[in-house]
Every structure is written in structure tokens, then in C-alpha cells.
Image (cartoon, helix red, strand yellow):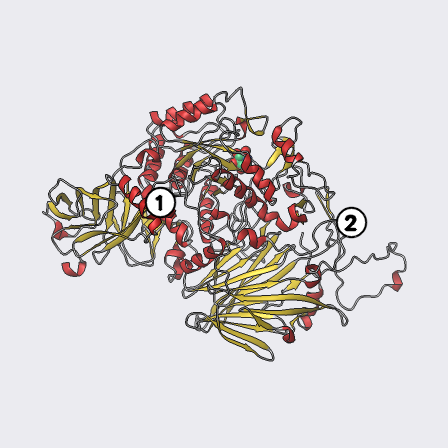
Amino acid sequence: MISRDVISLAFGQQGSPYRLDPNTIRMKNGQIEGTILKTTSEKEKIKLPLVVTFLDSGSTRIQVDEEKRQKGDIELRHDSKVRKERYNEAAGWSLTGAGLQPQKLSKFDKGAKSTTVTWGSSNQFSVIITYAPFGIELFANDKKQVVLNERGFFNFEHWRPKVEKPVTEEGKDEDKKVEPLVPQEDESTWWEETFGGNTDTKPRGPESISMDISFPGFSHVYGLPEHAGPLSLKQTRGGESNYDQPYRFFNADVFEYELDNPMTLYGAIPFMQAHNKDFTVGVFWLNAAETWVDIVKTQQGTTMGLGGHTDTLTHWFSESGVMDIFVMLTQSPKELSQKYAELTGYTAMPQMFAIAYHQCRWNYVSDEDVKDVDRKFDKHNIPYDVIWLDLEYTDDKQYFVWDQDNFPDPIGMEKQLDEHERKLVIIIDPHIKNKAGYQIVEELKSKDLAVKNKDGNFFEGWCWPGSSHWIDCFNPAAREWWKSLFPYNKMKGVQSNVWIWNDMNEPSVFNGPEVSMPRDNVHYGNWEHRDVHNLNGMTFHNATHHALVSRAKGESVRPFVLTRSFFAGSQRLGAMWTGDNQASWPHLAASIPMVLNQGVAGFPFAGADVGGFFGNPSKELQTRWYQAGAFYPFFRAHAHIDTRRREPYLLGEPYTEIMAQAVRLRYSLLPSWYTAFREAATEGVPIVRAQYYVHPHDEAGFDIDDQFYIGSTGLLVKPVVTEGGESVDIYLADDETYFDYSTYKTYSGAGKRHSVTAPLDKIPLLMQGGNIFARKDRPRRSSGLMKFDPYTLVVVLGRDGRADGELYIDDGETYDFEHGGYIHRNFTFGNGSLKSQDVSSSVSTKDTKKKAVYLKTMDNVLVERIIIVNAPKSLEGKSEVKVTGQSSKSGGTASMSYHVAKDGNAAWAVIRNPAVKIGADWSIDLGVNTDAKGEL
Ligand code: NOJ
């Protein structure tokens, strides 16, 4: 629990007790340093060192610490040996080190009441630091965007010794009691706290921190995953349809989590975007302890709209640690994504298989079962890439040891999967069974690599295996040891098509407080668990990620790790899923804003258990869930051990075929999904993008979170998430025409909702005019088998008769793409011709060879079809087009057919076998000017 003293509340009536001492303000190496003084009594002034840094990226970093704790000048209670400082290593885990260099300032003006700083390429950013009370205002283009401590909630629980109060007998000396002048502080949770039978000893006493952060003129804030609520965050101080408690971050294994609720879930990214039609600003609260965020919105100005606006006021508080806040001022959500990614890192480019379809359940019961499921997918022509093994593959929940009875031949099983380039993912959790003779736990203990309890002994708790110990991945030696367990010659029954699932890493401790570890447990470096709790999950999947990278000398393939718990920066390491949802329509609906929000907060490789984890979905629900899941960045079906088997081929017709079609659609669009992942990996942008993100100036779309775009393809989907749903209303923000994905039916009209019919076999999916995207249309068993398949390009002409789009390709497996081994094309259509141009960046001389080798492997990969949607009438009757840059044979031409518009469906044309290479420059001339202007 977070305690908050009443000093600041008491002072709140007379003014804040926090004042920046002007005599201490100095400019050093592009940073402002100073000391904030907290006045607690006439005699006592607590020193809080402040550093404000103006970063390369245009962001401002505000760090506040506490001098006494910094210097170790405090006494710990209970003879504790933990660190005396406030935890200051979250940055080391979360930040990559990029974008942290101070920027050259163009103005530093230290005045009597405040200091003003200006910087930025066109001096567009400025900050005013006010001394008394301490506060910071941040401006972009002369407009105030963000204010810190506007409401005086800045608070730092300074260290103080526990003063034992004399115990008075109830009722005695009643008449001598004097009412205090200022409200007395409620110390009941400062020094000790008992919860669920467990006592937290709090050796450092109270140490919480808080700050209020206001966004004037912003009525929408997004981000703060992981919570199961709407994308546009709700107010949290009560009132109709608001929450009555703050958004909470305390990573936890929450049983049957509730929807539309600010309760904590498995992961934490304390990053918020505030957005209005002119600006997007971000706040990143870099703290790994328990954190809460309150949100209120206030209407300012007149009610008739004249000069009136809404402000969003937020209040952030954490249980411990230093204060480390990044404020980013940008012009658009896209720019903000880039800035945030510069700090915390970009999505790791996954292998192609990882973005294909995954088949999981708790559990496939034997290697024969796995092989049987594998064959049945083939029999029913349903592609899939990965099959998963949950806990039951282990011998008595001992990770790294196979259950010999049910999985006597894991390698044989893996070999069968490999025949169709399929993979296996097995679960490995951070709790290690405490059983004599189990080599892993013996090593964990003898090497002293487990998390300790407050008394310095190995912490022992209860999880799937029963009594367990937990690997402490904060410890570099533990990570090295973890690495040593994965090499093929060490890890039994595992070959190179096997990857890892990390679950329960919040960490989940069945008999612990709030199903986790006691906060006074101790990690490497003598840090208390309370300080690092929200980082814990990330340190584990980080260790697994690195263990997989190094499992064989000379092997250079990208690892795959799925994690349940995460923190800011986890995007560099793998994928996440939204944990134990339920087989219900509301859970299906809730998964969409949850996945969108992951993208807003820089960790877009996300999905929910398709079909729902708990319970048995109806056939209709499961079918609709496959149609939605085919549009999650991470697409995996999963189910609880007590549920009925539900592999898609078991449902019978028409369900099986409809689900198969959804999976095939995912496979056909894999080239476009992969391109979207590349954008995330290089620009930090979401893979699936919310309405406000794509149309940042259209206020009507700011709270829409049930439809979304896939990358930059212009594909707009709105999955059906209601029982018996036969149609959906899709909101269109822009003036472009949109076309139904399969019938080319047209929809246009900006700022309106359009009804799209959606019987069970139909996914409401539209294509926005003006885009070109790539597909592979030959159905195969797995993505690996599609590697060298030819492409189909879909050219969706916009109102001006033009379109463009990109395609990124690499080997889908290795790191060669980092050395030029990739193809990146830009396609443009205009003036009657379609062109393919190289947009890959130039490579060093050293890498030229790698690039050439890769291009050679792709030499025979061609475009087999070009579909032009919204094809102009002038193409009618034309049967041949001119091809320049063709690979061969067809004599510089290709055939074309034209299909006239009818019944509200747009006209379209198909160019067959133009025989152009996917990796080369070429152009195709249609022989008429197709620009809309040219037409008129
Ligand atoms: C909890 C996970 O959330 C779930 O997906 C998994 O099946 C069980 N643990 C068993 O490992």
C-alpha cells in the first residue's frame, strides 16, 4: 500500500511545502541542477536534489531524489541489510541509452521567481520552472501543453525515524486529550502492514512519491496498459460511467479479471499519450514500484463552445523509488511513438512464423496428440505455424525435464513439425520446483541465484510445482546460468524449431500477498522486491530472450519468447498476450482496445487468447473470435485445461470452413503484416492502429476503439463482437472512398458511420482508396512454405486516381536484415503507370555482399497478379499493358482484364503474370492517363 503523509495536504491550504531553492540552481552539461526543499517544520528542511534534462529527442526529463537516502544517511529497521537509497535502476532496464543526450539550449534565463529554458531546432520548446511552490510548465510553439504540480500534489515521503508513541489505555485521561492544530498523520501503514496473513516489514519506512500532471486543452488520454477498459482512458474519481479508483500498476496474476475496470493486470507500461487535434504529448513515469494514476477532466470556459475546452488532470503516485519523469511534446501520435521508442526501444523484428497462426491449449497431452493435431490441420487445409505445449509436458512441473511417459520422443515430434516448417513452443516459468535431486533447483541454490526473503534465506513459495524457489534475473550471474541451460547439447529433447513461453512472471506466488512475492523480499543488489516488482516479469523474459540467442554457436536466428508480464522496454524482447480471458462476447470485445493500447504504449506485438481461456465458447463466438484474432498482431488460440477440445476442425461446417478462411486470410496478408512489423521495428509505431492514431485531426474518432487499421495498408477492420451480429457500423473519417475487401462495394462520406453487412462468414474489412498492399494468394500449410511464393499487389485507387504503398521482405528468420539482407519497395500508381522503386537504405561495403546474396535468393520471386480496384473506365476494352523491367519471356507486355462497376461495387482490373521481380525496379504502363483529373 502507498502511504501519503498529510504534511502536503495540511500545507495545501497554506501553500505547498516544496520550494526550489534559487541559490542552488545551476546549469551543468546542458542540465539544470538544483535542490527542492521540503519544509516539514520550522527547523527541518528536507533536501531533494533535482535534475532537469532537455533531451536530443525534444523531451524533458525530470528527476528528483532524496539526499539523505542518496547518501545512505538513514537507519534501517529490523536489522535489515537492504539498500538505503531509493531504487534508481529502473532506467537501466527500461531505457536503451539512446536519445538521452542533453540538447543545446538556446536560452537559459534564471529569474527571481522562475527559470526559463528554450530549445529545439526552431526554439519551439520552452520550460518554465517555478520556485515556490515548485512546479514546471512545458510549452510547444508558445502553447502550454503540460504542467507539473499545478494542483500541489507533488509529494516525497522523506526518511524519518520511527518515533514510538506511548501506548495509552483506552478511555484513560480522556479529559487531557488536546485536538492537534494540523491534522495528524495516519501512521498505521508506514512501518508495517499486514495483508492476507503476511506482514510487510518496511525496513525503510514510508517512501512514496507523487506528482500531479495536467494537460490543458486535452480531453483524451490513452495508454497505461495493461488494463481491461476503453482505449480513451476514463476518469477515476467517481461519477456516472467513471471509475471510482485510480488505474493501478502492480503486476499480478489476476484470477478471472473484470472488464471495464482500472484494476491491475499482468503487465505495466506507465506511459500516457494526451491527444488533441493539434498536439500529442506523452508522459512516461519511469518507476517499477506499485503505481497508481488518477484521471479527472474539467470543463473550462464558456459552455457554448466559445473559448471553452477540457483539461485532463492526472495524478501519479508510486510506493517507492526515485522520481523520473519524461515529458514529450510532439505534433502527432506518430511522432510521439518515435520519441518514446527512441528511449525504450523498438519492437524486435520477429521471425515470420511468429506472426502466423499459433495453436495452443492447456494441454496437448502427448507427443502422439501433437502429431495427430498436426496431421488434422493438414487434412482440413488449415494453415498453422506453431503448436504449443503448456505445463503438462514436464515431469512433475520440473522445467527442462520431459514427462517420459507421455512425451517419450520429443525430437520425433519436432521432426514431424519441421517437415512442414512448423515450430513448437514450450512453457518455462520462473518458479523452480523445490525438490531434492532436481538438478535445476540444486544448481539454482548452490550458485546462490534465487530471490531471498527478508531474512536472507531463499524465498520459498507455492506455485504450479508446489513448493518452489524463484530465479532472480536481476542478477547477471543468474542470467548467465539461465543461458547455460538452453544450448541444444544441454537441453534435452529440444531442437532448433523449439521456442519458449514465459508465464507467471509477475511473479505469481499462489500463497503470497496478492498472489505475488512479499514486498520485503530481497533481490540482487540488496534491492527490495517492492522497488522492482513491475520490472520482475521483464527481467525473466529478457533472460530467456538472451538464452535463446546464444543456444548454438554460429546460429543467428531471431528468438521467440511470449511473456505474460511486461514493463516499458519489453517490446525489444518478444510478444505478449492479455492473459486469462473468458470465452464470452464481452471478453472478445474487450480484447480490441487492449491490443490497440499496447500499440499506443510501444509494445504492439500483442494478442488475446482466441476463443477465450476460461469456459467453452459457442461455435458462433469461437468463429467470430478467429475472425478478430486474424487481425491481432499475435494470433494464438488457447484454452484452459478444463475446457472441451476446440481445434477449428472439430467444430464442423460451416464453422470450420469459416475459421479456416479467417486463418487463410491472415496468411495471404502476411507480407503486409510483416511490413507493418518492420514499421514498428524502425519507427516505433503500432502495428494495428486506432482511429485517432490514423486520423489525428478528426475529433469524432477520438474515442472509437472497436475498429482499426493494419499498419499503413489502408485496411480497416471492425470485427463482429456481438452474438447474432449481422452488420457493423464503420466510421469513416476521411473523404476517401473505401471498398469492401472482397466485393469492392464502395463506401464514402466523411464523418459518418456506414453500415456494412456481416453474416457469419464475413469479416467487415474495408480498403481505403489510395493504398497499395501486398498479398500471397497460394494457400499453404505454413508460412515457411510460402517463402518463395509469388506476390499479388492490390492497388486501390483513391479519388485522385492514385495510390501508393510499401512492402518489406527479408528471410524471415535470421539477422541478415541488419546487414542489408532485405528488400524494401515503394509502389506508386499514378498517371496510368505502376512503378516499383527501391527504398532500402544503403549498406556499408562490408554488407554489400550479404545484400547481393539475399537478392539472388529472391531472384525468381515474381509478382504474379496485380489487382486494380476502382479501375477507371478508360481501361475498359484494354487487354494488354506494357511492362518495363520485366524478368523474361512475355515480350514486355502482360494481359489485363477489366470488370465493370455494378450494383454499387467498384470496377476492377487484373493484370496477369506481369513477370516482374519483387526485388527489382520496374514499371507497368496502362497506356491511358488514369488520374482522376486526367479523366475528367
Ligand atoms: C496461466 C496462463 O495465463 C495460462 O495461459 C496457462 O495456460 C496456465 N498458466 C498454465 O500454464
- Quarter of the image for residue 632 reads top left
Left or right of 257? Residue 10 is right
Q: State the image coordinates of residue 300 (x, y, percent, origin top left).
A: 51, 70
Instruction: In this rendered view, identify the residue nearer to me: 96 or 276.
Output: 96
Label 2 within 8 A of ligand 1 by Cβ: no
Is residue 473 among the parts visible in the rendering?
Answer: no
Left or right of 682? Residue 363 is right
SS of the residue under disc 1: helix
Specify the quadrant that holds the C terminus. Answer: bottom left
Amino acid type for the residue under numbered disc 1: Trp
Residue 79: mark: 2
Q: Residue tagged by mark 1?
A: 673
The tag earlier along the polypeptide, 1 or 2, is 2
Q: State the image coordinates of residue 777 (x, y, percent, origin top left).
A: 27, 38
Q: Is residue 202 above or below residue 556?
A: below
Question: Residue at the bottom extreme?
Answer: 112
User: Label 2: how many residues lie within 10 Å, few (<14), some (14-19) or many (20+)?
Assistant: few
- Pointers 1 and 2 in contact (CB under 8 A)? no
Judge depth for marks 1 and 2 and give the one in front.
2
Amino acid type for the residue under numbered disc 2: Asp
Q: Which quadrant of the render holds ligand 1?
A: top right
Give the Cα distance between marks 1 and 2.
56 Å
The residue positioned 57% from the left and 64% from the top of the image is: 62
Q: State the image coordinates of residue 254 (x, y, percent, origin top left).
A: 58, 42
